[in-house]
Amino acid sequence: MKKWSVLLVSVFLLAAGFVSSAQAKIEVEGDVYVGLWDKYIWRGFDQSGSKPTIQGGIDLSTNGWTLSYWGNWQLSEDKEEGYESGESNETDIILTYSHDVTDWLNVTVGDIWYAIDFGTKDGLNRDGSVDTNEVFGIFSFDTLLSPSVKIAWDWDKADEDGLYFTFDIGHTFDLSQWVPKTALNLGAELSYNLHSDYLVGDYAGFHDYELYVSLDYALTDQLTLSPTFWFTSPICSAAKDTIDTETTGAINLTFAF
């Protein structure tokens, strides 16, 4: 009953947004991107055996709706962790609806379907290829440091509450007066896990914090090159039992249309 009730509520919210925008002219915009990463870190978990990966996806948006595809491909084999070279070990399909409630508040609701290969070992002793769903809401504030709060609920596989919270801040600095066509992005994220036992762990506590920096260099009006660096570290003792302090870097290329 939990799964179906959440699904029905999600469909209702998304349908409400669709009805409100159905009469508007349909104009599709979006982006296609690909990046080379030295490893794949997600919520502090090393999902590639510390081996390089290629990550890429596409976003299509119209009238507040966005349909996204994202994938991760292993570039080097790690037999101990069970990751094979050339294979995809995660695919995500995301459907969202976004609406500006006021001049300073935007609300986004949606669902993300994960299809994940956890390899042969990980912090939660999961094994093999599995899938699950998270419904989520994001509250974004147009003010100093652009803070946002995201609440995600694993309504599919989690046995407990399945809630995961993230709190983000960030700022973009225009460097074009010193370096033409360049911007610097700085950000930080703090996460709190509330028994999202399938994807994160069966505990309540601050899970990890993440710091990131990236540069956006506009090759053309539509094509952007972005070197990126992330640092993540666990906070509570339960998180420290499952994840380590990690760094990861990437070079991303994005085509906007």
Image (cartoon, rainbow, N blue to C red):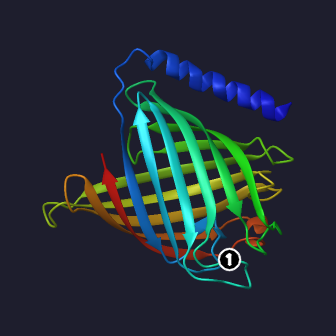
> So how many labels did they put on this image?
1
Left or right? Give the position of 31 relative to 131: left
**Residue most extreme to the front:** 86
Residue 198 x, y percent position in the rendering: 79, 55
Residue occupying image coordinates x 44% and y 58%: 187
Task: Report whether 40 appears left or right of 199.
Answer: left
Image: 170 above or below 179: above
Q: Residues within 10 Å of mark 1 (few under 14, many from 20)?
A: many
Residue 139 versus residue 238 in the image, above or below: above
Residue depicted at x 33% and y 30%: 27
Position of 37 relative to 188 (above/below): below
Q: Quadrant of the N terminus?
A: top right
Label 1: element kind: loop
* Closer to the camera in the image, 100 or 1: 1
Q: Is residue 61 above or below residue 252?
A: above
Say which residue label 1 marks.
83
- Image coordinates of residue 121 in percent, x first then y, are 78, 75
For image coordinates 81% across by 48% down, the residue present is: 157
Three-letter amino acid code at the position of disc 1: Tyr
> Residue 94: x and y, percent?
57, 44
Quarter of image, res 61: top left
Task: Give the x, y percent position of residue 246.
Answer: 59, 75
Relative to 203, 208 lies left or right: left
Quarter of the rendering occupied by the C terminus: top left
- Quadrant in the rendering for residue 235: bottom right
